[in-house]
Image (tube, grey):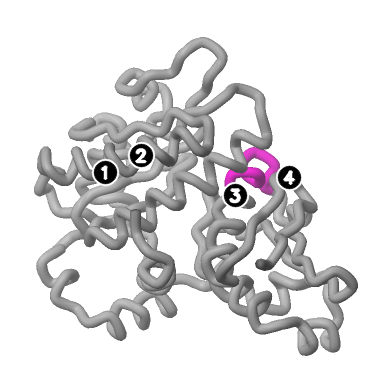
Amino acid sequence: MAEHTQLIDAINIRTAVRAYDDEPIDDDTARQLEMALQPINLLGDLNIQLVRDQPKVFAEANASGHLTNAANYLAIVGPANDEEAKERAGFYAERMVLTATLRGLGTLWVAGSWDKAEAAKHCRVTSGQELYLGVVIGHPKNHLDYQAKSYEELCEAQRTHRATKTYEQFTATMSDEGREAAPDWFKSGVEAAMKAPSAMNRQPITFSYNPADDTAAAHIDQSAEDEHHAFNDMGIAKLHFQIGAGQGQWAWGDGGLFIHK
């Protein structure tokens, strides 16, 4: 598993990749990804799976130009009708996304840009489980040129590739004085969460800091109107926050607290 500083690097360079080379994921890379999935599934009580060479799943999106050469995906499978499991799925699947980023692979969370019924045919969904979402994975278009870019160039591409909510929007429940007085670990956590993907690109999560007990809290922003994927997005954002903040741990759930250690 990647070290903490490498995960920070992955957050700083990860972008939503929609265009892929048609070069397949080779067996050795697939084996390494599947080995990384084993502890993630165990920790999260999930059943995330790597599925390769199924372009039919993305036929419509590829044909329209929304995606290019999408054919491989992570099937995010977990317990059915379980909001906490959906949050864990976001947290741990994004951990896998960052691992893939460090291996030079491109990724994209998908909720609507795939044929979910077709995707379900190529993964294992047992009784009591459901397929939540998917993550496209593969070699970015012109991936050799991509791999030749410097870390600074990749960071700039991340910074400019899409609009993001502001720090003030991510801490909407806090006063200006509260934001200013918050510790550096909280500010770093929010800044990392600002770089997190979300299933519908709505970033429906806010964070707050409580100086009375030195904790942070994460909340679903109901105004974002993303009731279908909000818990998944909360898990993704919590992971980014945790990596950015450094040592510490979240409690699951809307309003769950982060204890900085």
Do labels 2 and 3 touch, CB within 8 Å? no
Q: Quadrant of residue 25?
A: top left
Figure check: 137 above or below 238: above
For mark 1, give the secondary structure. helix
Residue at horizontal 76%, vertical 61%? Answer: 217
User: Where does residue 213 sit, x and y in percent of width and height?
Assistant: 85, 69
Kind of residue indicated by mark 1: Leu
Residue 202 in sight: no
Q: Earlier in the sequence, mark 4 or mark 3?
A: 3
Residue labelled with disc 3: 235
Q: Which mark is residue 33?
A: 1
Do labels 1 and 2 touch, CB within 8 Å? yes
Q: Earlier in the sequence, mark 2 or mark 3?
A: 2
Does 230 lie within the magenta span? yes
Figure check: 244 above or below 89: below
Residue at horizontal 67%, vertical 54%? Answer: 250
